[in-house]
Amino acid sequence: MPKQPGQRNVHRSFEARSRFPSKKSRYKATDALGFFRSSGTVTCLPYFLELKAKALYLAERAAEALDAIKRGESLAERYEQHTVLSGLHRLRAVFLAAMGAEETQIEDSFRAAIRIAKEQKAVSLQKRAEATYAEYRRQKASGLGGRGYRLPL
């Protein structure tokens, strides 16, 4: 997808937010998302909410990241942007694991990510979800987890 000026601003603001989590970068990212909402361009929002969730997670704000994922999933369903659903489910599982949520919730999210990727025949997304799920099971088996699983984004 070719990047328009607004899209570049969103990417830059989330990149800055993940590197330097300050109030200024947070407002830039929020302003950039607001631009897309106000302009009526909603097809990119689930993807940008995925970026926002990653930035929040890197700033150790997993609960807020999970909220962004939920909003992204609802928008993806509403506007039929199914290409991002696998990644959103995988990230939901990562954030739930970081927060120490129930094992069934975490595993259901991983399974949904893998299932959606298989349905879409998206091999790279499927392998990524399977690798993250395997890392989660490895950390769980070795007793490294508890409330602090650190899984790759």
Image (tube, helix red, strand yellow):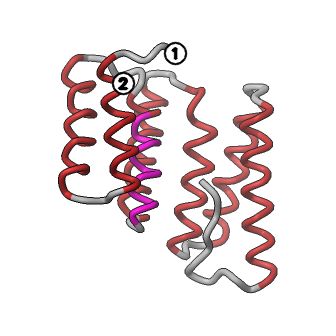
In the image, is residue 57 part of the stretch drawn in magenta? Answer: yes
Q: Amino acid at mark 1?
A: Met
Q: Amino acid at mark 2?
A: Gln
Q: Which mark is residue 141?
A: none
Name the element at disc 1. Answer: loop
Asked where in the image residue 8 lies, by quadrant, the reply is: top left
Please report whichever mark, 2 or 1, sits nearer to the chain's N-terminal start: 1
Residue at numbered disc 2: 7
**In the image, residue 2 above or below residue 123:** above
In the displayed structure image, the side of residue 120 where residue 39 appears, left or right: left
Instruction: Tell me where residue 79 sits by quadrant.
Output: top left
Q: Residue at x 35, y 37 (%)?
A: 12
Estimate the x, y position of residue 44 in percent, counting from the top left.
41, 25
Please tell me which residue is depicted at 73% across the width and 26% down the height of the picture: 120
> Residue 144, percent across and down?
70, 83
Instruction: Check the image and report above or below for 36 versus 144.
Output: above
Q: Is residue 51 above or below residue 118?
A: below
Report the predominant secondary structure element of the magenta stretch.
helix
Q: Is 105 located above or below residue 73 in the figure?
A: below
Q: How many numbered discs, if any?
A: 2
Q: Tell whether position 81 is magenta.
A: no
In the rendered structure, which segment of residues is drawn in magenta?
48-59
In the image: residue 119, left or right of residue 61: right
Q: Nearer the viewer, residue 7 or 90?
A: 7
Q: Is residue 86 left or right of residue 58?
A: right
Q: Which secondary structure, mark 2?
A: helix
Q: Are marks 2 and 1 in contact (CB under 8 Å)?
A: yes
Q: To which residue does mark 1 refer? A: 1
Tell me the crowding category of disc 2: few under 14, some 14 to 19, or many 20 or more residues within 10 angstroms, Cα based.
some
Report x, y in % for residue 140. Answer: 74, 77
Between 89 and 98, the one lying in front of the other is 98
